[in-house]
Image: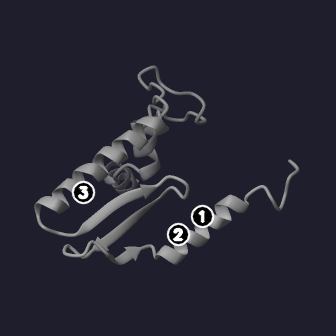
Amino acid sequence: MTTDIARVANTPPSPVAHLREAHGIKAGATGLERSAKAEPKPAIQFDPEAQRKNLQKTLEELNNQMKQTGRNLNFKMDDALNMPIVTVTNSQTGEVIRQIPNEVVVRVAHNLQDLKGILLNEKI
């Protein structure tokens, strides 16, 4: 009997007990009862306009850095597709050597975007 008590005393707490303690749930609680010290976490605030401005500012900084280092890379955000586009240009002629995603893919995606609503006009 003493060995059982010693074994239980030396056993580390279970992960569930650790999680309960971290979230302020009382021992033996059903999960609905929380201690007074646990406060609900605030909801994450998402501002799409601020996010868009931040992205635009970052792209401008990245483009300026590419110009300063002599690299012919240009980064921009396609607003209609909501995806970034990277272009590599020839510094002497200014022609586009490569675009990621490809120009054809961007054109097809724009056309598909324009077709939205034509195939189905009714709300379901």
Contact flag, marks 1 and 2 (Cβ < 8 Å): yes
Q: Write down the residue under mark 2.
A: 106
Whether residue 26 sits left or right of residue 95 in the image: it is: right
Whether residue 121 sits left or right of residue 36 in the image: it is: right
How many neighbours does mark 1 have within 10 angstroms: few (below 14), some (14-19), or many (20 or more)?
A: some
Q: Residue at x 55, y 55 (%)?
A: 80
Contact flag, marks 2 and 3 (Cβ < 8 Å): no
How many neighbours does mark 3 have within 10 angstroms: few (below 14), some (14-19), or many (20 or more)?
A: some
Q: Earlier in the sequence, mark 2 or mark 3?
A: 3
The circle drawn on residue 63 is 3
Camera-side residue of 68 and 24:
68
| Rendered location of residue 71, percent (x, y) | 17, 69
- Amino acid, disc 1: His
Whether residue 10 sits left or right of residue 77 in the image: it is: left
Q: Earlier in the sequence, mark 3 or mark 1?
A: 3
- Amino acid, disc 3: Asn
Secondary structure under badge 1?
A: helix
Quarter of the view holding residue 65: bottom left
In the rendered image, the vertical position of residue 51 relative to residue 118, given as above or below = above
| Rendered location of residue 58, percent (x, y) | 29, 49
Q: How far apart are labels 1 and 2 at the CA level?
A: 6 Å
The circle drawn on residue 110 is 1
Q: Quadrant of the N terminus?
A: bottom left
In the rendered image, the vertical position of residue 21 relative to residue 59, given as above or below = above
| Rendered location of residue 52, percent (x, y) | 42, 43
Secondary structure under badge 3?
A: helix
Q: How far apart are labels 3 and 1 at the CA level?
A: 24 Å
Q: Residue furthest top?
A: 36
Q: Residue at x 46, y 40 (%)?
A: 20
Q: Residue furthest front?
A: 93
Secondary structure under badge 2?
A: helix
- Amino acid, disc 2: Val
